Amino acid sequence: MALPKLAHTPAAHDKLRALGILALNGMFDEMDAVGVLRQAATDVLPGDLAIVSSFGADSAVLLHLVAQVDPSLPVYFLETGKHFAETLDYVETLKKHLGLINVHAIHPNAADVQRFDPNGDLWETDPDSCCHIRKTEPLEPITEQYGGWVTGRKRFQTKERGVLPHFELTSDDRIKVNPLAYFNDADVNQYKIDHGLPEHPLFAKGYKSIGCAPCTSVVAEGEDPRAGRWRGLNKKECGIHFDFNGAIASPMTAATRHTLWKDGAFIADPFHEWADDSDPATASYKHVPLAVFLANRDTFLANPHPLGLLVVPGDRIEDVEADLGRFASIAIKFPAFSDGRGYSTARLLSERFNYSGEIRAVGDVLQDQIPLMRRCGINALVVTHEPTRAALLENRLPEVAIFYQPVGTTEVPVGTRPFLRRVS
Ligand code: SF4
């Protein structure tokens, strides 16, 4: 799908500047969705309006409005490279069904993906950055070409969207149009039925809000439809809606300092602590205490979401040997007092059980412990101690003394003198 060549139209919203966005909302507040879109496309921003669609569970409604107003309006689909195959099929289904003739896929910059997400798992460790390179960055040059763009967002979807108006003024003086702002869940479903719109193939399987495959999960009956997006993370928006009218959607706590150190940087941590009221059947991205896992093993094994395991001194990692593959991350607690059991647990995981997932140290992680932690197979650290944080950032960790006991895979021959046990 080639992108259309657009001659940049000088901002066609002089009229808007005069009226002001508030007046605009006042004028069209009572108007129905198709009326809002028609006004935007024909009067407010003629020839200067684009539609951005995720081709998700509700997208057919907005695109049906587009088809009624003008099927040649440019529609952009963020092809992040992480969509369900069903979504890509659905793009073709809706194009054909609605007669849309100006649909374009926007792809992330290949060099950015290669550089920042070579393994395709950035969504897991740093979803903000993943959304940034796969959505925000590719969309920017597109929206820059238009005086405004249309979204399918609705007030009912999240608390942050609860005050969403029909028209928003963006920080760069563009207009975002939200014709469905006042639709609720029932309105959306009724609209789809009334107009015989094709359903997203995953909707019937319990996916009520559909984005990229790794960040979308099934929603339980009665659950918030968007609860399945970035489940378990403090993330509700992908970033493309942040820059505009901060009162409606503000960025997730971007300013929050990350404490997870992995692969040479502090990154966003997708995992959260297990709480007393966490549900073994639905928990996601939690480190489950080993004892809790053993007490609810069958339920956890049936739980489809990513989980981690928390091991504290005294836990026997051998007790969950058969289930280690279930965990994307294993957190080993290092208490404030000197306790070497965490190192032994890490060695068992990495050397005897060949566990290849994330092994992280949590608790009281101090800089002089880190070299030995690494040698024991720990590949991630949760660091809250300021001097340790600075030491990591400035790459000044102490050397491990050569007389530490070796941790290689080769057993030291019986009788070897301690001073010959050099660390390889
Ligand atoms: S929704 Fe998930 S996979 Fe898609 S861009 Fe954002 S973090 Fe990446």
Image: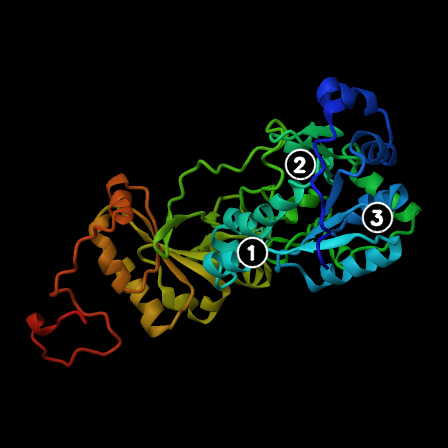
- The residue located at (12%, 72%) in the rendering is 421
Q: Quadrant of the C terminus?
A: bottom left
Label 3 SS: loop
- The residue located at (59%, 57%) in the rendering is 214
Q: How is the image coloured?
A: rainbow
Closer to the camera, 412 or 4?
Answer: 4
Closer to the camera, 243 or 45?
Answer: 45
**Residue linked to disc 1:** 109
Q: Which mark, residue 72?
A: 3
Task: Tell me the distance, in whole angstroms, between the alpha carbons under discs 1 and 3.
Answer: 26 Å
**Residue linked to disc 2:** 158
Q: Which mark, residue 90?
A: none
User: Which of disc 2 and disc 1 is earlier in sequence?
Assistant: 1
User: Which of disc 3 and disc 1 is earlier in sequence?
Assistant: 3
| Position of residue 414 in the picture relative to residue 163 (left or right) | left
Give the number of the mark in front: 1 or 2: 1
Tell me, yes or no, if residue 231 can be seen here.
no
